[in-house]
Image (spheres, helix red, strand yellow):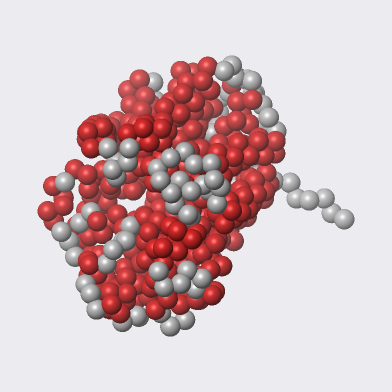
Amino acid sequence: MSAPAKAPTTAGGRETWTSSTGFILAAIGSAVGLGNIWRFPGVAYESGGGAFLIPYLIALLTAGIPILFLDYAIGHRYRGAAPLAFRRLAKRAESLGWFQTALAFVIATYYAAVIAWSCSYFIYSFDLRWGEDTLKFFTGEYLRVGDPEISTSIVSAVALPLVLVWVAVMIVIALGVTKGVQSVNVLFIPMLAIAFTGLVVRAVTLPGAMDGLNALFTPDWSKLADLSVWIAAYSQIFFSLSIAFGIMITYSSYLKRKTNMTSSGLVVAFANSSFEILAGIGVFATLGFMAHQQNVAVGDLEGLTGPILSFVTFPAVINQMPGGNIFGAIFFASLIMAGFTSIISILLGVAASIQEKFGLSQKSSAILVTALCAIPSVLLFSTTSGLLALDTVDQWANNIGIVVSAIAMTVLVVWVFRKSDVLAGHLSAVSTFKVGRIWRFLIGVLAPIFLTVMLVDKVVALVSEGYEGLPQWYINVFGWGTIAFIVLTAVIMAAIPWKGRDDESFVAWPQLEEEDR
Ligand code: PFF
């Protein structure tokens, strides 16, 4: 029997992706997720339709791609998950790494729940188990949604698939970067691309599809004057590209020494946005069909965003479609594949952070961290108050947590620790496409100013208006409590002495700049 092939490593013994294609597929896998399929179409529709593409593109070009490059540069140069990478950048920056890791941890807890719902709905597609009243089925029979409270009654139909999702995540993370994460992506990303393209082709050939596309793409220019539309665009880009969560830092830390990072980044960003637009087309063509069946305008349909769009409106359309079962099964399978390749990126990042801090083995930290994330995930999100908690935590994590993280990262790296020159040099030394003054202006000036204005606006709105009419105590626990948890984790984890490999002896890729000149 031949010995199992060993995973590739760098000279320093750090595991690496086998090729840049492996890395690109994994980075696309992280980026393309539930955010593309269930969030983008609804956000775009509500935020001005075709006109939304303007703030979306501006957010992509001025913040998305530049911060993606920043994540890559930090991870590759300092070769660590976020806490170690920031610690190597400057000792005092370690807590920023933990802030990002904690944010990613929180997101994973509820993201897994949506993948679990998709697993159930994949099976329900075969016999259209949701029946005629899909809203009643989703919130009543399936989720058994109750009042805003801290519920302890677990819904087994959700808990069971959720536990299975966590077991699958644990196995993949324990297998490591190449055998686990890379293999899953190499398999799922092409499958997802084929399955989803098939869905879109079917959707655009349905009667009424064009009305749906008109509803999505007809620009409402007046929305551009609304600051909240810009916030929606920036949040969508951050969430969608998986940036400022420490996750892309971790992914790029597993790159080989010579890797063309800027080109890879452009490929990833382009693939992610293309998938987003494709999902918008697929979803709205399908909604056009529904409106056509009901003889109403697309704008009069209800439930065009978030969980309701995928789990209530879509099943209703599937009911009316010839061959709906297959369409439904492929749709939910796509959600599962897209979501799974994203959640493993998060867990890999969190597990690597703990592994490096405490000097644990890769396997034990994978198992420990996945279990630590799975417990609150099941206890909070498979109860009768799971849907409400999910919506609230998501609102705070994505509109406040991620924006704070991006502001802190850009200001600290550029202005406090003054590393933008070094990082620009690093990126340029390994990449064909050079970054320089424009990049430094975008990450050092434009992005932090824009993001701060947005953050203030959002905080004022949430403080003064509350959220979705929820009671204040609930908002304090699940909304502001989420932010408090992340900040506390950052402070406590950074205060614990570093037990892993001595970072003092670390040398950034030796003489990289000189050698490559
Ligand atoms: N980018 C993923 C999506 O669009 O669904 C979600 C995500 C993955 C967010 C990884 C954050 C992260 F670190």
Q: Residue at x 47, y 69 (%)?
A: 130
- Say which of 220 and 393 sits in front: 393
In this view, 431 is above or below 22: above
Give the residue furthest to the right: 1
In this view, 395 is above or below 356: below
Q: Is there any visible trace of residue 51 in the rendered image?
A: yes
- Say which of 306 and 294 sits in front: 294
In this view, 491 is above or below 327: above
Q: Residue at x 22, y 33 (%)?
A: 464
- Say which of 92 and 76 sits in front: 92
Residue 459, image x, y percentages: 26, 33
Q: Residue at x 32, y 70 (%)?
A: 287
Residue 36, image x, y percentages: 39, 56
Q: Is there any visible trace of residue 112 in the rendered image?
A: no
Residue 410, image x, y percentages: 35, 30
Q: Residue at x 45, y 46 (%)?
A: 385
Q: How many marks?
A: 0
- Say which of 202 and 443 sits in front: 202
Residue 92, image x, y percentages: 46, 18
Give left or right: position of 369 versus 37.
right
Give left or right: position of 25 versus 438.
right
Give the quadrant of residue 39: bottom left
The quadrant of the picture occupied by the N terminus is: bottom right
